Amino acid sequence: MTVPTIAWKGELPGVVELIDQTLLPTEVVVRSLTTHEEMWEAIQSLRIRGAPAIGIAAAFGLVLGVQHVADPAIWESEVERVALHLKTARPTAVNLSWALERMQDRVRREKNLSLVQRKKGLLEEARRILHEDREICRRIGRHGAALIKDGCSLLTHCNAGGLATSGYGTALAVCYAARDLGRTIRVFADETRPLLQGARLTAWELQQAGIDVTLICDSMAGVVLQKKKVDLVLVGADRIARNGDTANKIGTYSVAVLARSHQVPFYVAAPISTFDRTIENGDQIPIEERAAEEITEGFGRRTAPPLVKTFNPAFDVTPHELIAGIITEHGVIDAPSTERIDRFFAAHHLEPVPRSAPARRGSA
């Protein structure tokens, strides 16, 4: 993509520019945001989406919300207020709260600096989150490319490409890395009902990158697997529990079950920041439920009877037993489980195992 998914423009005060993903693929419109309320709306309405991109957006949103604070006495309380508001935008993707907690930690470490220095430090931290994501995604791509042979055919669900990150992707990073190694690949993209992220975003991204992509309806995934058109299923993630249970866009669990039934390996690609090891398993992952109109009046046209009841969870959870491996920036966790993930984190000197896990249940 020639236009970055999200970027900070200027110094302080500055603005955030992001691609409005609700208008793709027919329009490429860049929005300029100046307040944290605008960023909250952009995250909640899916103008920007994808776990890593949401984390970056929240970090920049916090800067927007406090860049005009003039009184040092209220600096920390304003940071807390804005962060709490941004955390309510969407509940499932853990990168949102992870990024905000990292930003707040920076504030706590710089209590003795001037207000100007603290503002600059906050912007520096947000920029660092963005730049780190770019390198992390490329490392995920390199590790995942080892699984992709020349002529490989993949199935993916939703969008885990550059639009879901700072610009390179997680699941699609594997495709890009394989292409860069000279391997010929083919991708089947589920349309991903009800908001069609696969049709509107993934198919568009892959076409832009010159990768052979075939769009299918969600209900066609089983036939594609049955006819042995797919060698590997590869998806992203919005939150991964300590045992490897993984929340991703609604419909992912169905694809995982189909993949297991047809002996096709199912892989998840995600950065370490998407792991939430304060929760033991997928039952504790909060699941966002969205408006009924996304189903009954998709893209402005009613397709269901008036007053019909709906159930519209935005995500589902794939049990770790169905996952062949989780591709991270530090390597692949094969056959994920609590023990394997704990060993992986310890081997790579990542965060320690949590001593207690607060219960966090969302709507089913």
Image: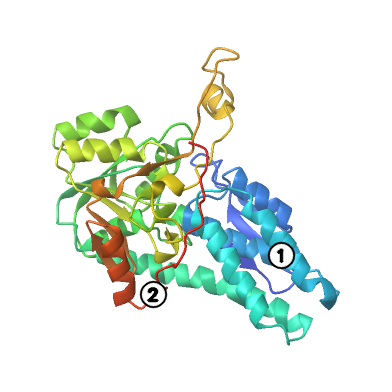
Q: Nearer the viewer, residue 212 or 154?
A: 154
Up the image or down, 303 lies above or below 47; here it is above
- Label 2 neighbour load within 10 Å: few <14, some 14-19, many 20+: few
Please state which amino acid type lies under the numbered disc 2: Leu
The answer to whether mark 1 and mark 2 are in CB contact below 8 A is: no
Q: Nearer the viewer, residue 103 or 202?
A: 103
Marks 1/2: CA distance? 27 Å
State the mark number for residue 350.
Answer: 2
Asked if residue 5 can be seen in this view, the reply is no
Q: Earlier along the polypeptide chain: callout 1 or callout 2?
A: 1
State the mark number for residue 80.
Answer: 1
Report the number of discs: 2
Up the image or down, 178 lies above or below 255; here it is below
Image spot of residue 26 (x, y percent): 51, 39
Image spot of residue 264 (x, y percent): 17, 44
- Label 1 neighbour load within 10 Å: few <14, some 14-19, many 20+: some
Please state which amino acid type lies under the numbered disc 1: Glu
Image spot of residue 113 (x, y percent): 73, 86
Q: What residue is drawn where x is 63% and y is 64%? A: 60
For residue 35, side relative to residue 363 (left or right): right
- Give the quarter of the image for residue 216: top left
Q: What residue is drawn where x is 48% and y is 41%? A: 25
Q: Nearer the viewer, residue 190 or 270?
A: 270
- Give the quarter of the image for residue 174: bottom left
Image spot of residue 286 (x, y percent): 50, 46
